[in-house]
Image: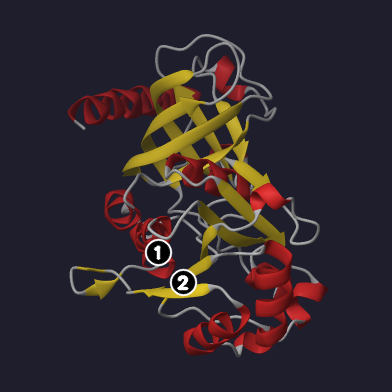
Amino acid sequence: MKIIKTWQGIAAADRGVSVAMGNFDGVHLGHRSVIETAAAQGPLGVLTFEPHPREFFAPDAPAFRLMNAEARANRLAKLGVSHLFELPFDAVMASLTPEAFAQEVLAEGLGVAHVTVGMDFCFGRGRKGTVADLQALGARLGFGVTVAPLLRSGGKEISSTAIRNALSEGRPRDAALMLGHLHRIEGAVIHGEKRGRELGYPTANMSVAGLHLPRLGVYAVKVDVLTGPQAGSYGGAASLGVRPMFGENTPNLETFLFDFKGDLYGHHLSVALVEYLRPEMKFDGLPALIAQMDADCLRARALLAAA
């Protein structure tokens, strides 16, 4: 998959693509419906924005994203997307009227052949552009427009908001039903305090900055090591939280990979939340903590074996 981060000076070979357009946070089943509809129109591309417009307009608001740009790109590549137009959402982009966006970005800049959006899509300054406006502009500017219907599950619309709610309540399996895949946290392994190694449970530490936090606690997880000589898939147990035992308050993800030996610093992991095991706890001492970690890992292994 080719990632293009501008809408100006696009090479001729990258023009004429059929794009699914939206933010695609989570790449859930509703998003996949839009992308699959776009695929029927020609060479498949996705047009999205980085940062998410909500982050641009409210940078100090609580984190809400289900996945970072890296995770989104990895998921889109698995869906057969050939071109990812990850356009910068900045003051210039925010100022474009619906008409200017359609003409300058879609028609002249990217030269799209076709655009597919969801029924609730809005665009342009102040989100004033509707799908009807996009269809009229496409007819005038020379690109087709298809509006994909919203998907529902259990009588309710599949949405990123519903998925966030499920994760916040410690229901990763319910979130996975709406996503069409397990919810994953992806990123580089960073240096931590190395306490896990001293306790017999060396962990891979990852930042969760900028992401919506699922319910804090311990999870059974599936782990893909994406880079390095030990790339592959592993089971594991992960702690998402603030480590109350040690008086820390910055959330992060600490993952113990079963049957793994090696150095993961700097390599990239994809950690899938399979089952919520328990909330964070503060123990009377290290022996009690280690005993609980033993129990967590036994339970996680059993759950993963049955999955």
Q: Position of residue 226 (x, y in %)?
A: 54, 26
Report the coloring of the rendering. Answer: secondary structure
Residue type for callout 2:
Val
Mark 2 residue element: strand
User: Split into 4 quadrants, where in the image is the C terminus?
Assistant: top left
Q: Secondary structure at mark 1?
A: helix
- Residue 305 found in image quarter: top left
Q: Mark 1 belongs to which amino acid?
A: Val
Badge 2: residue crowd in 10 Å (few <14, some 14–19, many ≥20)? many
Residue depicted at x 41% and y 47%:
183
State if disc 2 and disc 1 touch (CB < 8 Å): yes
- Judge the density around disc 1: few (<14), some (14-19), many (≥20) Cα neighbours within 10 Å: many
Does the image show residue 60? no
Name the residue: 74% across, 78% down: 94
The answer to which quarter of the image holds residue 109 is: bottom right
- In this picture, is 207 found above or below 131? above
Point out residue 277 in the picture as x, y percentages from the top left corner: 32, 40
Q: Which residue is mark 1?
A: 34
Q: Residue at x 50, y 25 (%)?
A: 286
Location of mark 2 (residue): 117
User: Left or right: 224 with respect to 9?
Assistant: left
* Residue 61 x, y percent position in the rendering: 66, 71
